[in-house]
Image (cartoon, rainbow, N blue to C red):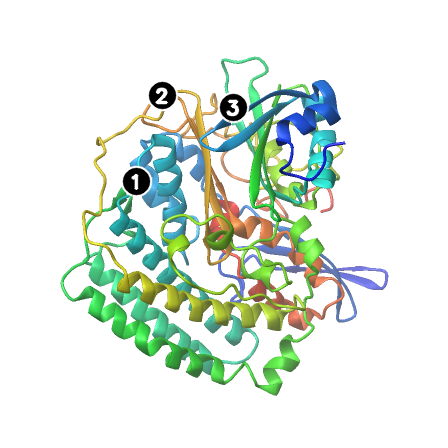
Amino acid sequence: MRVLGEELELRFGPQHPAIQGVLVLRLRVDGDRIVECRPVIGHLHRGLEKLFETRPFGESLPLTGHLDLAAPVTSNLAYVGAVERLLGVEAPPRARFLRTLFAELQRIASHLLWLGTHAADAGAVPPFFAALRERDRVLDLWASYLAGWPGESGLRPGGLSHDLPEGWSERCREFLDGFPAALATCEGALTESRLWKKRTVGLGVLAAEAAVDLGVTGPALRASGVAWDLRRARPCEAWGEVDFDVPVGRNGDTYDRYLVRIEEMRQAARIAVQCLDRLPDGPVLADLPPAPEAPRDSEVYHAVEGPRGEIGFYLVGDGTATPWRCHPRAPSLANLQALPEICRGELVSDLVALIGTLDVALGEVDR
Amino acid sequence: MSGAPGEVPLSIALREELGDAIETARTLQGELTLRVKCEAVARVCATLRERHGFTRLVDLCGVDFPGRDPRFEIVYHLCDPAAGRRVRVKVTAGEETPVPSVTGVWRAADWPEREVWDLFGVRFEGHPELARLLLWDDFEGHPLRKDFPVEGTSSLSPSPGEGGGEGTGEGAGG
């Protein structure tokens, strides 16, 4: 802490209960108001992009799950999609529907974790328990699909490692049937609450133009009124074959970002039910050699709509089974660049709510 | 003038507007890649943004090809949300040749350009504050270069003390 004339320099972090990871914010404050906020990142840098260059395509898959620990499945999905396009293979229809289902379950799990922690950060504790209980049910579904393998999603270049076990679809359907009511419980204490609105309406406004200019994607972009969703704009997997709405906000404030994510969970459950209803029969894995080689001088960029926005991979192949370059386009990196924008002029006491509303995963920011 | 986007293929329209700034244009796997003269990249990006609707810089990263001269490629992925199309822009750069910054075209380029400087050692001219992004200030070397060892070097721990572990160009401010 330093005093600069009328202003004060404050350092927030690196450890703080409101940060899902490690992050430093250098703040200049005037009284209670934030004049400037400068994020300092890199504390969780593990050199993942260097590691991707040292092993065959398939073996990097678990590493991609380490980008965003709250949503490993969508990172895996973007990666296997990129590898498939680079190698020129296609996942069978059954795998495409199951991967879409898993991605939507991941969106629900990730948004629930966000909802619980964001609400608790802002002082509303009960939704935390309700949201985390529902999220646990999604994690249980995965645990039973994967027989408890940790850090695994079952996704593979070319499809999935194995088909659903006996009784899994029924359990999944049971969860999805009860989910709208459970979600209503989670949001019951918030959506129409005067306290919650007072805390979030008008807070941290991000204008549509600034959001686009800063590269913001995902719910944070849509809450600013920009209807951009990769599932709609460039559908892959089975997203082109299911019905869903893309919720869009109007004011780009913390409350709108909240509403957009709540509605996205409802739409995710709707997509998941359709995937189960229309699940085709057949194999779940295409034929691929154990360590397939990418063509010489090949390159591809493939992205999917993750819970935080556009998660993509840029791959460069050099004729071997190892990528020459593998660069993840992390939505949280771009979204975190918007933090100084939404903090300016706000109260220091709202800072944890402003960090929470962007829902960044520091693991993929730092890689 | 090029007319509405989509009427004239993008690469032809750009060649008309920018002349020989566009070196090659090829489509592979449905992805259009424009190779651009390094010194013209900011101008090309500004044209793509202002006249062709590429309002979003999706991603910016580096690739190292030590066997080539110049050895680095800087790769820009742009998106035109209205038409739902993408384009990839590439320039080559050496250790000594700075690349014009596109931070003036999209603010989104700020951290990615710092990251390329940090991990590859490619400079961006016109960047407001080209400091390391992920590693600390007194880190030696640029780890995503192919000649940087995977197991690291002896300089792989930040010096203790104020700001030592924070990296990212804050050192001068104290």
- Left or right: residue A338 compared with residue A277: right
- Callout 3: chain: B
- Callout 2: chain: A
- Left or right: residue A324 compared with residue B86: left
Instruction: Note whether A100 is above or below B103 in the view shown.
Output: below
Neighbour class for label 3 at 10 Å: few (<14), some, many (≥20)?
many
Mark 3 vs mark 2: in front = 2
Residue at the image point whose x is 70% and y is 54% from the top: A210
* Label 3 with label 2: CB-CB less than 8 Å: no
Instruction: Note whether B120 is above or below A134 in the view shown.
Output: above
Residue type for callout 2: Gly
Q: Regarding mark 3 in the picture, which secondary structure is present there? A: strand
Give the labeled residue for mark 2.
A319
Give percent across and percent down for residue A134: 35, 74
Q: Which mark is residue B109?
A: none
- Callout 1: chain: A
Mark 1 vs mark 3: in front = 1
Image-quadrant location for residue A85:
top left
* Label 1 with label 2: CB-CB less than 8 Å: no
Give percent across and percent down for residue B147: 47, 21
Residue at the image point whose x is 38% and y is 68% from the top: A270
